[in-house]
Image (cartoon, coloured by chain):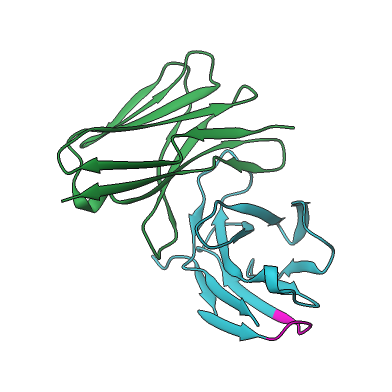
């Protein structure tokens, strides 16, 4: 069974630019979660999508947004990139809700210069 | 708001020594999940505990869920170099999975 996939693997952008990250969940999973992990730090919750709807967002500014498609894949968009947005962006999927374990993708390493 | 704390933040052990990380939640949890992230990798689900006082074992790893369902521990017996990484606990809230701050384990050969 294929795991969670993310693209691209690495990305280098300039401050002020916009970026789109993509995630495909495990087949059968309806929930997709996005996390930000700055180098050497913990996981900061960004967004939760389930059944195509945004269910919750973490303490991040509105320039972080996303969506979930009918096939449950998801995009994370970050506008007006800032240097501190440099981080590993992890996508995870699960069956609906937080009582289920989450399966993480390999992440997208974003560097903002 | 709900918080999940872990101690210690870092732990260096000689290969063969035991290791324990502790997780404490500010609120009662319906379950506790444990994840491992190898250096340069992504978090990988290890186990979920649901019942008060539950103890589960995976080879050299022993997981416990406290009686009050507010704390948990992960104990590794006779660490190996393959155990290196950061161990996170996580507890579900209403609309979020609260990850602990993690314990980074270094195993010295």
Residue A2 relative to residue A71: left or right: left
Query: Residue, x 69% and y 68% (percent of image)?
Result: A84
Residue B26 relative to residue B9: left or right: right
Q: Which residues are magenta?
A: A14-19
Q: Which chain is cyan?
A: A
**Quadrant in which the C terminus of chain A appears:** bottom right
Nearer to me, B83 or B46: B83
Query: Residue, x 20% and y 41% (percent of image)?
Result: B79
Residue B107 relative to residue A42: left or right: left
Nearer to me, B77 or A103: B77
Q: Position of residue A68 (x, y in %)?
A: 71, 67
Tag count: 0
Image height of A38 relative to B15, above or below? below
For this orientation, the residue located farthest to the top is B67
The colour one sees for chain B in the rendered image is green
Nearer to me, B42 or B86: B86
């Amino acid at each position: 069974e294929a795991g969670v996939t993310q693209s691209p693997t690495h990305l280098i952008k300039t401050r002020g630019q916009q970026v789109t990250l993509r995630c495909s969940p495990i087949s059968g999973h309806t929930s997709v979660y996005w996390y930000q992990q700055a180098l050497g730090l913990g996981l900061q919750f960004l967004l939760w999508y389930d059944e195509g709807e945004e269910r919750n967002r973490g303490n991040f500014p509105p320039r972080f947004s996303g969506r979930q498609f009918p096939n449950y894949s998801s995009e994370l968009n970050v506008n007006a990139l800032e240097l501190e947005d440099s981080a590993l962006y992890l996508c995870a999927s699960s069956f609906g809700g937080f009582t289920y374990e989450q399966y993480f993708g390999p992440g997208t390493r974003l560097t903002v210069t | 708001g709900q918080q999940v704390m872990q101690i210690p933040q870092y732990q260096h052990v000689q290969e063969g020594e035991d290791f324990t990380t502790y997780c404490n939640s500010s609120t009662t949890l319906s379950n506790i999940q444990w994840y491992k992230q190898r250096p340069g990798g992504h978090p990988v689900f290890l186990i979920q505990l649901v019942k008060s006082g539950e103890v589960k074992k995976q080879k050299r790893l022993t997981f416990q869920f406290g009686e009050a369902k507010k704390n948990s521990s992960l104990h590794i017996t006779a660490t190996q170099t393959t155990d290196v990484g950061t161990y996170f606990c996580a507890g579900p809230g209403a609309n979020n999975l609260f990850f602990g701050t993690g314990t980074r384990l270094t195993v010295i050969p």
